[in-house]
Each structure stands twice: as structure tokens, then as C-alpha cells.
Image (cartoon, rainbow, N blue to C red):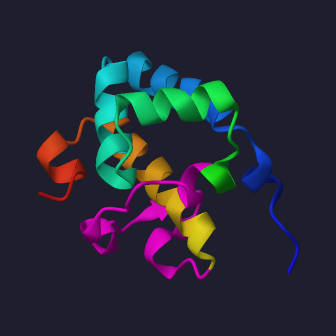
Amino acid sequence: MDRHTIYAMPFAKVYPAYIKKAERKGYSKQEVDRIIFWLTGYDEKGLQQVLDEGKDLEAFFADAPRMHPNTGKIRGVVCGIRVEEIKDSLMQQIRWLDKLIDELARGKKMESILRS
């Protein structure tokens, strides 16, 4: 199976796009970070290290301290594909994060986004 080019994209290139998307809708970088921390187990220091080291998306998820146990509750469509049906685990993780940021931008309550 061919490796998706998105896997090699630096997280530092994707992260500002998430923040910009949230800010355009009146949300903050802190809310984006909260989602990332919840999903991956990174903290502020760990996230900054990822950005400083230029880790790609594959390394970002591979090195994540822990994926949240409620990730199975993340359901819905991103880019026309149901995230719960994605077979490639790395692509699914990427799309989970996309989905959560989309939910923030659409005004969903944080408790709901974080599957509380």
C-alpha cells in the first residue's frame, strides 16, 4: 500500500490551519490545544516540542503519550468519509483530529467535542 503524502506533512504546518479555522469562527488557540491534549495526551510542553522538532503527522501520532479511550465515540463525516469506517489507523487518527476541530468551528460545546 502506498504511503499517503499527508503522513509526511509537518504537524507545524497543519497546526496553524487548525488555529486559523477556529479563530475565524470566534474560538481560540487554547480551545484547539485542549482538543489536541484530550485526543493525544500531549501537554503544552510536549506539543511545543513536536512543533520545534518539525515532527510529521505520522510521528506526531506515533509519539503521542496516549490516545484517549473515548476515540471510538468520534463519529461522523470528514472530507466525505465516515471517520469510524477508516481502516488505516493513522489516517483515522488524523481524521479524528480534523473532525474534532470541525466540531469546534461549528460551535459544538466542548463537553460534547471531548465526548464527556
Q: Is residue 89 above or below residue 46?
A: below
Residue nearest the observer in this picture, 50 or 103: 50
Q: Is residue 50 above or below residue 27?
A: below
Residue at 67 percent of width and 31 percent of height: 53
**Which residues fall within the magenta stretch?**
60-87
Asked if residue 101 shows in the view, the reply is yes
54 sits left or right of 109 in the view: right
Q: Quadrant of residue 96?
A: bottom left
Residue 46, quarter of picture: top left
> Magenta stretch: residue 11 in it?
no
Q: Is residue 112 above or below residue 9?
A: below
Q: Residue at x 28, y 36 (%)?
A: 34
Residue beneath the point at 58% across and 60% down: 62
- Image quarter hosting the N terminus: bottom right
Locate residue 109, reporting x and y percent: 16, 41
**Residue 93: image x %, image y %?**
51, 62
- Is 68 positioned to the left or the right of 94 in the image? left
Query: Percent from the top left, x then y, of residue 91?
Result: 62, 65
Q: Pick the residue in front: 116 or 108.
A: 116
